[in-house]
Image: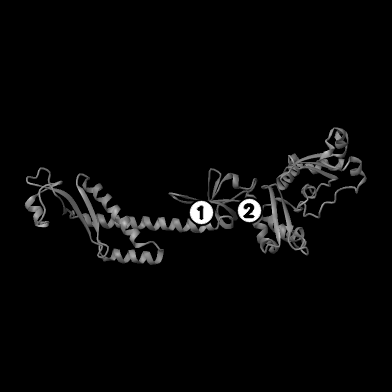
């Protein structure tokens, strides 16, 4: 151990921001452990580290006695008085007991401590960096695949993409560059775990923010998202500027913006829905591309009965109920879809107080509730 160690600690403090005092305390603790490991724990010893010179000394605490029975724990009065002239029998004194080869052990220990502290500092910096980036999109390279879990190289660390975070039907290959959404960063003893996803609804939102300047600038807002990754998604959008069409802004010239998002999601279909504070219009829009005659909402239980033309029933429900399911997720309303014929049969038993529009009035009104223009089935 020498002054070179102190210089190295000073340099680490300047470049890495690790306090020198913290490193020294860690070295002291490690030196005590190293001594007991190599020379036994019978002696009550203390390892001292000189913070200016880097020298290491081992001191053993011994009891002053007239006759020594255990030289590791006891010392005679004359020997003790050479070090501490005023000491007496039964006093406890410290006597240097630095082993001849302890310098080499101390140097190795100090090196290991410094390396460990550097690793911990690096992990802490990585954790802080990605903790601040939680909720963002990152681009990385597929590094390896283990038990269907994909590990993505993010530069200084790797992201973990669990099977549930992968788009159904999408294939990944080692070396492939992909975009993913950071949805959680955990600090663990082995370093930070960064969980990324391509199936998360917010991944879709962030992609639109990258493609649509109006969303990034706050003129257009994505109010809600309903997504079945790899198959179909619906997003509702609202404009804070009457001159800006939120659906048109998201679709882009010739559909260029939405097609970029669709391409990133391997062809996932996206319906862009105009948000409306009126739940009747919002639910009708959400069922696009199906036409809707009327919507009868019940605020009490958040259930909306939707009437569609007979020939539009299957379109409104969608394949395996997907369109209705996504509309319900998007609006937050449970959707009960009926065609005209079904509604006519059940009308007499239905509690008409939930809506002040009679069936005849519905049928005599315009043909259907006019859906807002949507980028349906993008």
Q: Horizontal and vertical percent for residue 2?
A: 25, 64
Label whose residue precedes the other's in the sequence (1 or 2): 1
Q: Closer to the observer: label 1 or label 2?
A: 2
Q: Is residue 22 left or right of residue 261?
A: left
Above or below: residue 2 compared with residue 304? below
Question: Relative to 4, is 272 on the left or the right?
Answer: right
Q: In which quarter of the image is the N terminus?
A: bottom left
Judged from the image, the secondary structure of the residue bearing numbered disc 2 is helix
Q: How many labels does the image show?
A: 2
| Up-down relation of residue 359 to residue 213 (above or below) | above
Residue 311 location in percent, x, y?
86, 42
Left or right: 335, with 358 as reference point: left
How much space separates mark 1 and mark 2, taking CA atoms? 18 Å
* Residue under the image location 56 percent in, 55 percent down: 134
Where in the figure is residue 258, as x and y percent of width and height? 72, 57
* Residue 139 visible somewhere in the drawing: yes
Q: Which residue occupies the foreground of this view, 4 or 349?
A: 349
The numbered disc on residue 203 is 2
Label 2 neighbour load within 10 Å: few <14, some 14-19, many 20+: many
Question: Which residue matches tag 1?
Answer: 158
Mark 1: few/some/many CA within 10 Å (<14, 14-19, 20+) = many
Please say whether residue 154 is visible from this viewpoint: no
Residue 322 position, x and y percent, is 73, 42
| Relative vertical location of residue 256 with respect to residue 172 in this rendering, above or below | below
Q: Which mark is residue 93?
A: none
């Amino acid at each position: 151990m020498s002054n070179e160690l102190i210089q190295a600690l000073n340099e680490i403090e300047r470049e890495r921001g690790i306090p020198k005092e913290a490193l020294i305390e860690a070295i002291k603790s490690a030196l005590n452990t190293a001594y007991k490991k190599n020379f036994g724990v019978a002696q009550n010893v203390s390892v001292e580290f000189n913070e200016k010179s880097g020298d290491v000394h081992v001191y053993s605490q011994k009891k002053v006695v007239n006759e020594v029975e255990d030289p590791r724990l006891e010392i005679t009065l004359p020997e003790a008085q050479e070090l501490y002239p005023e000491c007496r029998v039964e006093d406890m004194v410290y006597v240097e007991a630095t082993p001849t080869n302890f310098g080499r052990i101390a140097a190795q220990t100090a090196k290991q401590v410094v390396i460990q502290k550097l690793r911990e500092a690096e992990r802490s910096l990585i954790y802080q960096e990605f903790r601040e980036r939680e909720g963002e999109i990152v681009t990385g390279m597929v590094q390896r695949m283990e038990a269907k879990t994909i590990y993505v190289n993010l530069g200084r660390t790797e992201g973990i993409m669990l099977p549930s975070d992968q788009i159904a039907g999408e294939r990944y290959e080692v070396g492939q560059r992909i975009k993913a959404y950071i949805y959680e960063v955990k600090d663990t003893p082995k370093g930070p775990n960064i969980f990324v996803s391509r199936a998360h609804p917010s991944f879709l939102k962030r992609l639109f923010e990258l493609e649509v300047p109006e969303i990034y600038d706050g003129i257009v807002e994505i109010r809600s998202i309903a997504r079945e990754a790899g198959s179909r998604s619906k997003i509702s959008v609202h404009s804070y500027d009457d001159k800006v069409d939120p659906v048109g802004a998201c679709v882009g010239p010739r559909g260029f913006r939405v097609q970029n998002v669709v391409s990133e999601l391997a062809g996932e279909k996206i319906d862009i829905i105009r948000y409306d504070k009126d739940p009747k219009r919002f639910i009708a829009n959400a069922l696009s591309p199906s036409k809707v005659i009327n919507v009868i909402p019940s605020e009490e239980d958040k259930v909306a009965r939707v009437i569609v033309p007979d020939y539009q029933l299957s379109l409104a429900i969608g394949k395996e109920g997907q369109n209705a399911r996504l509309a319900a997720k998007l609006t937050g309303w449970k959707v009960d879809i009926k065609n005209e014929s079904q509604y006519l049969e059940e009308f007499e038993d239905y509690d008409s107080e939930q809506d002040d529009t009679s069936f005849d009035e519905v049928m005599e009104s315009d043909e259907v509730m006019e859906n807002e223009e949507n980028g349906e089935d993008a």
